[in-house]
Amino acid sequence: MLKTKVNLGEKSYPIYITKNFSGLGEALKKAVIGGKIVVITDSNVKNIYLEDLISLIKAAGYQVFSYVIEAGEASKNLDTLRNIFNELITLQLDRNSSIIALGGGVTGDVAGFAAASWLRGVNFIQIPTSLLAQVDSSIGGKVAVDFKKIKNIIGAFYQPKLVYINVNTLKTLSEREFRSGLAEIIKHSIIRDKEFFDYLESNIETLLSRDENALLYTIKKSCEIKATVVAADEKEEEERAMLNFGHTIGHAVESISAFNLLHGECVSIGMVGAFKLALKLGITEQSSLNRVTKLLKKIGLPVCVEAFDIGKLYQLMLSDKKARNNKLNFILPRNIGEVIQLEIDNEVIIKEVLNELIR
Ligand SMILES: NC(=O)c1ccc[n+]([C@@H]2O[C@H](COP(=O)([O-])OP(=O)(O)OC[C@H]3O[C@@H](n4cnc5c(N)ncnc54)[C@H](O)[C@@H]3O)[C@@H](O)[C@H]2O)c1
Ligand SMILES: [Zn+2]
């Protein structure tokens, strides 16, 4: 079992990176979790992991219940929350209780927001089972639901008491979801750690075969990078913005594709866009762009898109909540392992880059 930590003073918490669930009971006790536990999961993950997990938590001496939400982004809304709260009333869930999120980022975001708001906050535990959730959404305390088709518009910062990752749950994740999750790992290496990028480049085949040890190492490394960034800036005032590398263009591509592309696939395209922009501005070198593009292609991630309306995409980028005064905020690479933040209002150059992203 590997372990790392998110350092946030009194709100610090451990991240366990393991090969199975056998250490969960002890981890819960170490985090001084008492009272009733409600496991919230989705309709896919339920069929594979819920029963075993419940037996394990029971065996550790807890009273445990479960609640299942429909799998998919469409569940990340206020109706699902209302249903969860109805259940929590029935279960008489008090201040001493805990909510566990067992599943991908959708489950984590919904269950986390329920935990943050129920009785003004009960203990929250993340057991992420998708690759995206294991290296990204379960760490850092951002929880939210969508509203009126706007993603993550109602939410909170609410840190979990612990994150428990069993890398072997990834064995049942679909190939496309798995590859998409790798995009965020590549992102972490590019913003912070060149050696980690070198490792990913050399070991990509092993990783794609979901080798247990390669997963343990890679997920731990990736969690450490996210944890360090979050610890330096919990509420995204400065430092945490670097996690948005690849997301300025990525988010816009995600909405223009009407969510037919997965998040990681859009981030992949967005990272290539950021490198192309950095290259035009003379900040980075062609060789770095080539290396990143090659690795993304090896993973099977897209590095360009089918025809789209560049004007519309640009408008979507401007309407993102992170744009200010018609200036777009970009995280751009200097090298692999080092990024800088830049506000850019040069529409021509940005549109040139968008044009180059079309197949
Ligand atoms: N809170 C944050 O900081 C943060 C960061 C990034 C993304 N997000 C959010 O995360 C969500 C995306 O997360 P996601 O990609 O995990 O999506 P998801 O939760 O929808 O999971 C993807 C699919 O994989 C299935 N699945 C999950 N684990 C599985 C397993 N082990 N075996 C088989 N199937 C499994 C799910 O049922 C689902 O169908 C988005 O809503 C996004 O906004 C949040
Ligand atoms: Zn992302």
Image (tube, rainbow, N blue to C red):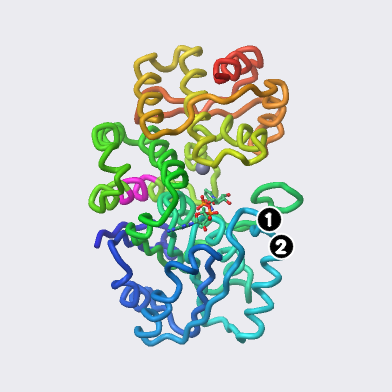
Compared to 35, does 5 lie above or below? Answer: above
Q: Nearer the viewer, mark 2 or mark 1?
A: 2
Mark 2 to mark 1 CA distance (whole Å): 9 Å
Answer whether labels 2 and 1 touch (C-beta < 8 Å): yes
- Secondary structure at badge 1 equals strand
- Count of numbered marks: 2
Q: Is residue 37 left or right of residue 19?
A: right
* Residue 62 rendering spot, x and y as whole percentages: 42, 85
Q: Nearer the viewer, residue 276 or 49?
A: 49
Residue for badge 1: 154
* Residue 316 rendering spot, x and y as whole percentages: 70, 31
Kind of residue at badge 1: Ile
- Secondary structure at badge 2 equals helix
Q: Which segment is the magenta one? A: 219-225
Q: Residues within 10 Å of mark 2 (few under 14, many from 20)?
A: some
Q: Is residue 220 left or right of residue 300?
A: left
Q: Is residue 40 left or right of residue 16?
A: right
Q: Is mark 2 within 8 Å of ligand 1?
A: no
Which residue occupies 63% across, 79% down? 88
Residue for badge 2: 78
Q: Nearer the viewer, residue 91 or 46?
A: 46
Kind of residue at badge 2: Leu
* Residue 165 rendering spot, x and y as whole percentages: 36, 61
* Residue 285 rendering spot, x and y as whole percentages: 38, 15
Q: Nearer the viewer, residue 330 or 37?
A: 37
Location of the N terminus by quadrant is: bottom left
Helix, strand or loop: magenta stretch: helix
Which residue occupies 39% across, 14% down? 286
Which residue occupies 41% across, 47% down? 226
